[in-house]
Amino acid sequence: NAALPGVYVGVVMGRHAGFLTAASALGKKFPDDGPHLIYLPERTFDLNQFLLDVKTMYERHGRCVIAVSEGIHDASGTPIAALLAKEMEHDAHGNVQLSGNGALADLLCEEIKAKLKIKRVRGDTFGYLQRSFIGCVSDVDQREAREVGEKAVQFAMWGGRDGSVAIKRTGFYSVDYELLPLEAVAGKTRVMEDEFITASGTDVTDAFRMYLRPLLGSGMPDAFRLRHHPVARVLKK
């Protein structure tokens, strides 16, 4: 990406909670790696401040990688996608359809091009990539997903109980599985704690990195850079 100057906007699912978008921060290895900016639905999104943030990062690095939750909204709670788009689909519950289209990425890219006069601006809206990409799976997540299923079968067959199996952390990182009543979880969302988000609202804190790291298991794919080692020319003219 360092060889591709410009702005890149990646829109990640998350209507009310920004955990998945925030997880992009774990992709950073070097201080100037992207994402340079992260926008979450737990904070109010201001378009003018967004453009100023992008301008600052672009001038600093010559590029800017941005991770945006699909559910970013203004002070009134209205999704930005609904404010900027002329027509938006709605789901069966009357909610604005945030996923399944590239509206938000396209709209943000157009704003950057028009207001900041940056020519190279690209945007993607992650779909199946974030839901079913088997090429990059956390071994911890894979193991716990199976164990949740096993526990559900045990509760149903041996206990004659119904509900929702929850993963509860114990210790630094070990887990236990408990059965919760459906009414305790259905239709509810756990949002990111304030301690996980920086004061600027465009990055995550070390507390979030510590929270997230155990879930990666063996870790992220490693990234390397070629070091600059100029050598004296030995060929004669």
Image (tube, grey):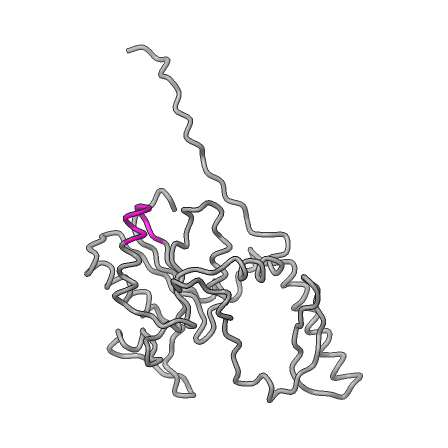
What residue is at 67 percent from the left and 66 percent from the top?
144
Q: Is residue 51 above or below residue 87?
A: above
At a point 69% along the width and 81% down the height, the residue shown is 179
Q: Quadrant of residue 100?
A: bottom left
Q: Please indicate whether residue 32 sits to the left or right of residue 147 in the image.
A: left
Q: Looking at the picture, how far across and down is residue 18, in whole percent? A: 46, 69
Q: Main secondary structure of the magenta part?
A: helix
Residue 214: image location, x then y, percent: 62, 59
- Quarter assignment of residue 51: bottom left
- Asked if residue 197 lies left or right of residue 106, the reply is right
Residue at the image point whose x is 37% and y is 44% from the top:
2
Quadrant hosting residue 35 = bottom left
Q: What range of the chain is rendered magenta?
A: 56-64
Residue nearer the viewer, 135 or 159: 159
From what the image shows, is residue 234 above or below residue 209?
A: above
Magenta includes 57? yes
